[in-house]
Amino acid sequence: MNIDLNAGQGIQITGPAKVRVIDGKLSLLGSIVPPDQEIIIREGKHFPFEAEMNSKIELDAINAQYMISNDPLIPLDRKELAKKISEFQSPVKVMVLGNVDTGKTTVICYLANYFFSLGKRVAVIDLDIGQQDIGPPCTITLGLLDKPILKLSEIPLERMIFIGKTSPSGRMLPFVSGARELVDYAQNTADVVLIDTTGWVFGSAARSLKTAKIQALKPQILVALQKEHELDHLLKPFELSTIQIESLSVFPQIKARDHSTRTFLRECGFNNYFKSASARMFNLKNLRMQDTLFGTGQPLNDEALTLVEQILECKLVYGEKAADALFIVKIPQSIYNKNNLEKVRICFGVQEIRIVNKNEEKGLLVGLLNSEFKTLGLGIIENIHYRENEIRIFTPVVSEEVQIVQCGSLKITKTGQEITSQDFLF
């Protein structure tokens, strides 16, 4: 369908949809949309266009969802915020907080375009590991603008750090330390560093994470998107600090994305990332494993493995012992005697025993790192040949620098579907 807009009007379109400017002049988040350029809006995404002059657009969507407004879709407080940020010396760090679906990403896009148009070097750090835009899900990323953007996914990926799950919960320490690493890199590269965050803002764990993140990243400006005062519990600890706190209104027309939509967007992100992947076989002698007990000890000899089999009354494939833990791989059909675990622990003098089924690691998402702990990319474990010391990983990474395999806790298919909602402990 074709839609006419008068100068000064705005239209917010919710995906999935395809938009093309037929005539006139439209801007999206401070960036002018070129004539005849098709803009694809993914499902669950909301794009606010503004007519700079009388315009006509073509909207291609089934059951199109859109809203025409006579008021600007970029509220005045966003424009005032941009001017306040301009008063700071470079590099200036701006962190944006908000509940899920409050428009954090939209604010980041607008500010990025604003400062890029002024000739500033702009870096965007995306800490939303569940709804990643610059890189694949389960990572935190850094991108550097090289042109105006219509969405964060258009920013070229500069650095990526693997976290391993879709929420910071359970991974807070690597999450905060990784964010600090990205900020250190960004402030040595850019004039303006914009930090997008997760929508996890309620509960004691969320409080702890946000406080640790703010203290570690030390933004000069803390932006809070809130309808009333729902973020005050996160802001109050910093009200007497040197951080300048700015509150922004939440655009009332934003619609919350449901769980299925958020899952779908993650699947799309994974599917896009792994579309050019292939299987690679790695020799475990040349790799080191992280965030798992596997690979951190010495393999059990046949006598020790037989002893464990006899105590647990099950058939085992592989085992290894570290100073504090025992890692055991068993035949899937074989059921072990849980009542005898304490006997094994005392016999081998360990604090922890972890038992997994053979091939249970299939689908586990992993990060592939070099010797300097730089994330080269992601992979999906296909299988591990324990006795042959080999691991097969499905990955788009072709670099020969891979020396560390960092295990996550999420299992997915090669096309991005999440296999289980529960964290997998390997």
Image: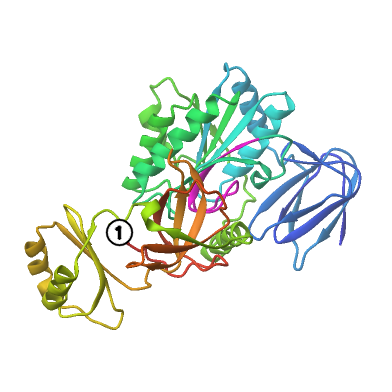
Label 1: state its secondary structure: loop
**Residue 268 image position (x, y, % from top left):** 61, 61
Kindly identify the residue that appears in the image at 10 percent across and 73 percent down.
340
**Residue 15 image position (x, y, % from top left):** 70, 59
Majority secondary structure of magenta residues: loop
User: In the image, is residue 6 part of the stretch drawn in magenta?
Assistant: no
Residue tagged by mark 1? 294
* Farthest-out residue, right: 23
Does any portion of residue 328 appear in the rendered image? no
Kindly identify the residue that appears in the image at 74 percent across and 57 percent down.
66
| Residue type at tag 1 | Phe
When asked about the image quadrant of residue 315, the answer is: bottom left
Horizontal arrangement in the rendering, residue 227 relative to residue 301 (left or right): right
Q: Nearer the viewer, residue 294 or 189?
A: 294
Residue 293, above or below 336: above
When asked about the image quadrant of residue 258, the answer is: bottom right
* Quadrant position of the C terminus in the picture: bottom left
Horizontal arrangement in the rendering, residue 345 relative to residue 36 (left or right): left
Does any portion of residue 312 appear in the rendered image? yes
Residue 342, above or below 194: below
Query: Label 1 neighbourhood size at 10 Å, few (<14), some (14-19), many (20+)?
Result: many
* Farthest-out residue, bottom: 333
Residue 116, above or below 364: above
User: In the image, is residue 143 part of the stretch drawn in magenta?
Assistant: yes
Kindly identify the residue that appears in the image at 24 percent across and 55 percent down.
297
Q: Nearer the viewer, residue 225 or 118?
A: 118
Range covered by the magenta-colored residues: 128-144
